[in-house]
Amino acid sequence: MNKNQVMRKLPKIGALLEDPDIKKLFEKFNRNLITRTLRESLETVRLEQIKAVESGDSATEKSEEDLKNLVISLALKKLSLQQYSLKRTINATGVVLHTNLGRAPLPDDALEHIAQVACDYSNLEYDIEKGERGERYNHVKDLLCEITGAEDAIVVNNNAGAVLICLSALAFHKDVIISRGQLVEIGGSFRVPEVMALSGANLIEVGTTNKTHLSDYEKAINENTGLLLKVHQSNFKMVGFSSQVESSEMKLLAQEHGLPLMEDLGSGVLVDLRAYGLPQEPTVQESVKSGVDIITFSGDKLLGGPQAGIIIGRHEYISSIKHHPLARTLRIDKLTLAALEAVLRLYRDGELDKIPIIKLLRRTADEMEHVAKEFADSINKVLNGKGRAEVADDFSQVGGGSLPGVEIPTKAVALNLYGHTAQEVSDMLRKTAVPIIGRIYKDKFMLDLRTMSRRDIDKTIELIEGLL
Ligand SMILES: *Cc1c(COP(=O)(O)O)cnc(C)c1O
């Protein structure tokens, strides 16, 4: 067969649209989408066949009927997967703040507020009281001040941006003094020295990797010092002979020299995690209390809100930041703002149980036991002897560069499909209509209940059934 013969044997779009299997799709999908998908599938098959002809691979010679079926099955597959690129996935990894899986899931209140604001006009930058231009930051400013005890607040796109704008607005061409033990890399491409360079501030590192004393900061202060910076070692732990200087001590030193003290907290914890049996993380409120002038943290880490960079602190500094040109480039959008306002209101009103991240962190293995058993039973029922699901004791992680090394006891379901390795099971579940992302531990594929909602559990059972 040569190329022309291939071309002649390929089905025509018109004929494909008349195929009964394709016709059925008109109930579910729009005609343009179906036609486009058929064209794409046809093109894929055409290229494959030409390649086969060129490589002289006669084994791949197909009849007209074969080619038509090939195009149709490809199109059906594409359409059944026809979903948004960004889509719901089931997080069965047990990593509560999984950066690759979207960090914090939002509470329903956030979704409702987004819906209200998204499809209509809003007072995003309009002062209804005065009937004139207002500020977008005002929608969350009072809430942030009330919850944290800070004087003023502004929010930007994310915490990396928050750190950048603070340094640029407050210490451009000035020295910023930081402990060597806090020159951290957060992952992705956030490295404190690099962000500092980009901001136009000069990095002055003091102390040693493991220990920094107040006197180290003191000795480094001169007339060109712009601020003292503290960065939370959020994604790693230092043990043994190590120490950093307390914020309250640094505050006294900064005050003595008329300098602002800034702290990048990373994860914005607004509640005492010890109440949930987790190790202590410095809270935003504590940082405000110890006198830190400017504090930055993420909206979508332990706070459990949307991606955002929250900056709180003294009014004079917030004001400089607000008027800095980077404020426009890092501007928070209205949907994020709507979500953030909703989440912050839950904190203010003490409705912590409505915040998914808090709920997930609080779950105990005992609480999950019953659900885990039911889940395993349901899976076993649909497996019908083709595999086995068993409840297992395991550990979840917080993730998102928060609480490193902390392992929270959890319940998981170990899923074995006979004749398949754990990796194969993992691959199969990942490629379902709603991707299920689990983890492999000691050659077993595990579904951790901690990060799975009721909806996720039901969907997972349905998807496993569909696989068999
Ligand atoms: C996570 C983190 C950042 C970056 O925050 P994003 O919200 O991801 O931009 C910066 N600093 C610290 C200490 C962090 O933990």
Image (cartoon, rainbow, N blue to C red):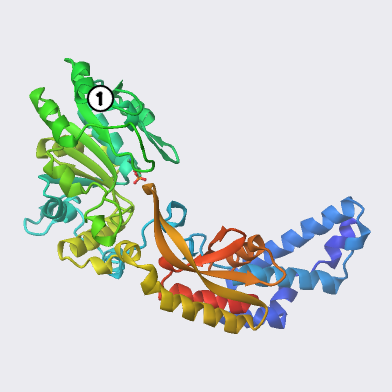
Give the position of the C terminus as an image quadrant: bottom right
Give the x, y percent position of residue 342: 23, 63
In this rendering, position of residue 224 left or right of residue 383: left
Residue 34, visible in the rendered structure: no
Is 369 in front, or is 156? 369
Q: Quadrant of residue 201?
A: top left
Task: Kindly identify the residue that appears in the image at 9 percent across and 28 percent down.
Answer: 255
| 437 w.r.t. 158: above or below | below
Is 119 in front, or is 364? 364
Disc 1 packing (10 Å; few <14; some 14–19; many ≥20): many
Task: Kindly identify the residue that appears in the image at 12 percent across and 51 percent down.
Answer: 145
Give the x, y percent position of residue 392: 51, 69
Give the position of the N terminus as an image quadrant: bottom right
Residue 296, visible in the rendered structure: yes
| 393 w.r.t. 188: above or below | below
In this rendering, position of residue 305 left or right of residue 394: left
Count of numbered labels shown in the rendering: 1
The residue beneath circle 1 is: 176
Give the image quadrant in which the ligand numbered 1 is located: top left
Give the x, y percent position of residue 235: 38, 43
Q: Element under label 1?
A: strand
Instruction: Single out the residue that lies furthest toward the front.
Output: 240
In this rendering, position of residue 111 left or right of residue 65: left
Does mark 1's beta carbon lie closer than 8 Å to ligand 1? Answer: no
Q: Mark 1 is on which residue type?
A: Val
| 209 w.r.t. 446: above or below | above
Q: Quadrant of residue 121?
A: bottom left
Give the x, y percent position of residue 328: 27, 41
Task: Kindly identify the residue that appears in the image at 7 percent across and 59 percent down.
Answer: 129
Is 249 in front, or is 101? 249
Q: Quadrant of residue 146?
A: bottom left
Is 449 in front, or is 302? 449
